[in-house]
Image (cartoon, rainbow, N blue to C red):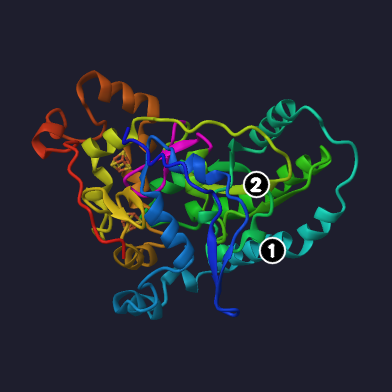
Amino acid sequence: MLGGGGKNRDTRLRKPNSWKQVIETRRDNPGKKITDSLSTVKTDPDTFDMYSEVAPLDELPGVMQNKAMLGFRVEFPKWARRRKLIDYGWEVIKSILRMDSWQPLLEMSVSGKKEDDLSALKNQIKEFARSRGYISGFTKVDRRFIAGCRDEKFPYDTALVLGMEMNKALLEEVPHPGRKLFDFEIYVESGKRVFEVARFIRSKGYRCFARIPFDGWVKYPPHAINAGLGELGALGVVITREFGPRLRWTMISIDADIEPDKPVDLGMAEYCDACRLCLRACPGDAISEERVWWRGVLKRKINDTKCWPYFVKYEGCGICLKVCPVNRFGYEECMKAFKKNGEILGKSGNKNWRKNQGAGDGKEIRMPAL
Ligand code: SF4
Ligand code: SF4
């Protein structure tokens, strides 16, 4: 538990309109209150607002300019030469077309009687999502996590967050995968099933708009945390009770005022301080040793420029996911051992690890936000 930002501020955001040379006010942002009062992720709402308004989240600083990354980019990744990427690519393109071209037509055609009981509707949607292979939770969209201030990409305030488990055996093949890639398998499968969930919601009389997992407009992990599905791990992804870090996310924007689920504290902040196996295993040394302030959020920052070369070299890498004890042993087993005697499962000589490393001593480094 880290203690929340918790400021009660105006929820409207601003965006620069460079064409008219003015600052405009964006629509209401109901998810902001949820993020700002999280107990598991410490935020500084003032800084966070400033960066999401002035520098929209789709702008990755230094990505294109960084020579090291550029060097690896022009040296084509080996999977680019493989048939499997062509197959995956075609499936992803189909889901993009379905999302952006066909779905708007479906939006206009919603009719029929609305399910009036929103609590019953919530349960029905969750049950259907479960039958399609998802864990799910409801929250309100936090528009700071929409890239480029493009609010129309997520038109309604209610957000259904859907997580699909990645194949554990495929993840075990990392860093030398065979014919299938652990992440793209989910991009393809979830990129189909999310539309089935959207169709179910429309059949209940409500408009909705599904986004596919291979999508950069809406940032899914913070919404998964807000929806009570998990907590941010040191490796930069959401750790869940059900599958650890072994998920990919997608979301549906729904035109119904469904009660949000509550964020959860799984104790991952303390666990990661004591564990750090992903930090040790990362070939690029890309995960920060301590939590740092980055654009208004206190967290372990993944250094994109250090990660990317290995991400390319190892066809998606994922070593950090593979070594995570919560992936290997499951959340309940990990927490049982940790609470009993501070043991981190899978870590040799671990009994005094916490003491020896000085981990969990609350040490924080405040970095400049840029
Ligand atoms: S994907 Fe690989 S290089 Fe990137 S953070 Fe994880 S282990 Fe490190
Ligand atoms: S490997 Fe350890 S430190 Fe890294 S995310 Fe998993 S539990 Fe946290």
Where is residue 208? Give x, y as percent.
74, 48
Give the residue pinned by disc 1.
94
Circle 1 SS class: helix
Position of residue 301 in the picture relative to residue 166 (left or right): left
Residue 16 versus residue 167 in the image, above or below: below
Q: Is residue 314 magenta?
A: no
Q: Nearer the viewer, residue 309 or 3?
A: 3
Residue type at tag 1: Lys
Identify the magenta region.
Answer: 227-241
Q: Which residue is mark 2?
A: 157
Residue placed furthest toward the left? 356
User: Mark 2 or 1, which is nearer the eye?
Assistant: 2
Estimate the x, y position of residue 126 in percent, counting from the top left.
66, 32
Apparent side of residue 104 relative to residue 111 in the rendered image (left or right): left
How packed mark 2 is, by other alpha carbons closer than 10 Å (few <14, some 14-19, many 20 or more), is many
Residue at x-position 89% and y-position 36%: 113
Residue 209 seen by the camera: yes
The front one of 203 and 83 is 203
Sequence-first tag of 2 and 1: 1
Compared with 137, 16 (above or below) is below
Predominant SS along the magenta part: loop
* Residue 190: x %, y % from top left: 62, 49
